[in-house]
Image: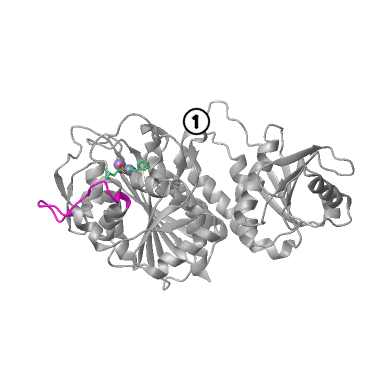
Amino acid sequence: MNFEIKTLSPGAALTQRSDALIMLIDSSFKPAKDALSQLVGQLLASGELESKPGKALVLHRPAGLSCVRLVLAGCGDGGARDVRLGVVSAVAAIKSSAIRTVTLYFPALHQEAAFRSAIMAVAEASYVYTTTKSKPEPRSIRQVVLGVPDASRRKAALDQAVATVAGIEYAKEWANRPANHATPTLLAGAARSLAKSASKITCDVLGPNEVAKLGMGAFLAVARGSQEPLRFIELRYAGAPKTRAPTVLVGKGLTFDSGGISIKPAPEMDEMKFDMSGAASVLGVFRALAQLKPAINVIGLIPACENLPDGRAIKPGDVVTSMSGQTIEILNTDAEGRLVLSDALTYAERFKPSAVIDIATLTGACVIALGGVRSGLFSSDDALASALLAAGESASDPCWRMPLDEDYADGLKTNFADVANVAGRPGGAITAAKFLQRFADKFAWAHLDIAGTAWKGGAAKGATGRPVALLLQYLLSTAR
Ligand code: BES
Ligand code: MN
Ligand code: ZN
């Protein structure tokens, strides 16, 4: 998708040539003297058009306009949420036609977050997955002109939004791919090709032998049941001097999670191909960094493997030694995410990071707690937690802070190791975070449980690309 920005007055919008001119009308709309504004004013007065988001009005070849279709979309209060809903309804209204070029016209534009959310919404509404289709349906909207009252003021926001879209689409691509088209080795290939195409990015990939030498017994244990060799991916983005401490992102990279010997039920098990969405979000962030080149340092760590049952697989009750030296009793082989993350968190210590953020489709319990609206945020550091919460709001990719009281760790006690990998069902997202916290005591740490937000099920089944926008917003906030 190609984006371009232009200063557009209502008069200039009349002569804008495109397959569709989408005009966003908020509740404060006051018609000026030009023909377009007058038309909108009349439609609002007659009740045929409403400023609240939801229903878009399509006019074909309107007299006096150069566009093929005029789409009038209410965007309510003009905030990020209503603007997103307005754009989504506008694109839905014209999706069946062959639309290649779209002008998104904002007669009034206030918040930067709303502008960014509009750009993300057009991309979202026109995204198509094609990789494993034999006759791929092409993407319809290819060219988007953003018409705003003052283009020069929106340049930085445009660059950020366009890079975010590229990152989100990269994350979606990898998360959507079926497990046999997104093995740990293929994920490592994606990371390597990112590094190849960007001068500030480098990449190293470790295999089973190197991981064994590092003592990553927990990660190795999860990968044991699979024929696919594990990969430990390390991406480095160097946009600032070496003296500047990096932020480390750790993405859970289970390219398929069957549960292992504690096998999952068959219904919806296919969705466990999305269990590498944390890893995909890290790849997406690096894709965006390559484009934006901010003055920061970032490390991306991805422990990637499959969790399968096999004669060699780990069994409930097995005890393994993690890289930190702590022994872990694996009471449930389906609680594998925390195992691979624990070793990656220990590995992160070597970077002397300013913060470590892990991103994981970690628990079904988080889906129950927060649904698909907000990701779960857990943090031992109040400043980091507030910065991530704020970034989520600003990027329209919100999260919600959850508690980490020490009492929640009680259920992880066992007679046979330093810690068990599961507690009971109550507070399952929190007990999982308490497990991770044991491996994250040497730095400011946050954990994002994206089990509910990383993909959608049902008819709209597919990756969302979350939380690329949140992470990128946070990283950019550390540059200023
Ligand atoms: N990848 C799953 C978490 C998951 C489940 C995400 C459903 C999205 C939808 C994770 O590895 C897992 O299986 N967690 C278990 C933990 C339990 C055994 C303590 C879970 O949530 O059931
Ligand atoms: Mn699992
Ligand atoms: Zn999992």
Q: Position of residue 9 (x, y in %)?
A: 82, 57
Residue 133 appears left or right of 154: left
The residue lying furthest to the left in this view is 415
56 horizontally vs 415: left or right: right
Percent position (x, y) of residue 414? 13, 52
Q: Dot 1 surroundings within 10 Å: few (below 14), some, or many (20 or more)?
A: few
- Whether residue 196 appears in magenta in the rendering, the answer is no
Residue 198 visible? The answer is: no
Residue 428 screen position, x and y as percent: 29, 49
Q: Position of residue 35 (x, y in %)?
A: 88, 50
Relative to 32, say whether 309 is above or below: above
Residue type, label 1: Thr
Beta carbon of the mark 1 residue lies under 8 A of ligand 1: no
The residue beneath circle 1 is 132
Confirm whether residue 308 shows in the render.
yes
Main secondary structure found in the magenta portion: loop
Q: Within the magenta stretch, is there residue 420?
A: yes
- Count the marks: how many? 1
Say which residue appears at 29% left-offset and 34% top-offset. Answer: 264
Specify the quarter for ligand 3: top left
Per the rendered image, the range of residues in magenta is 413-429
Task: Tell me the quarter of the image containing the N terminus.
Answer: top right
Nearer to the camera, 412 or 475: 412
What secondary structure is marked by label 1? loop
Q: Residue at x 23, y 60 (%)?
A: 407
Viewer-nearest residue: 381 or 308? 381
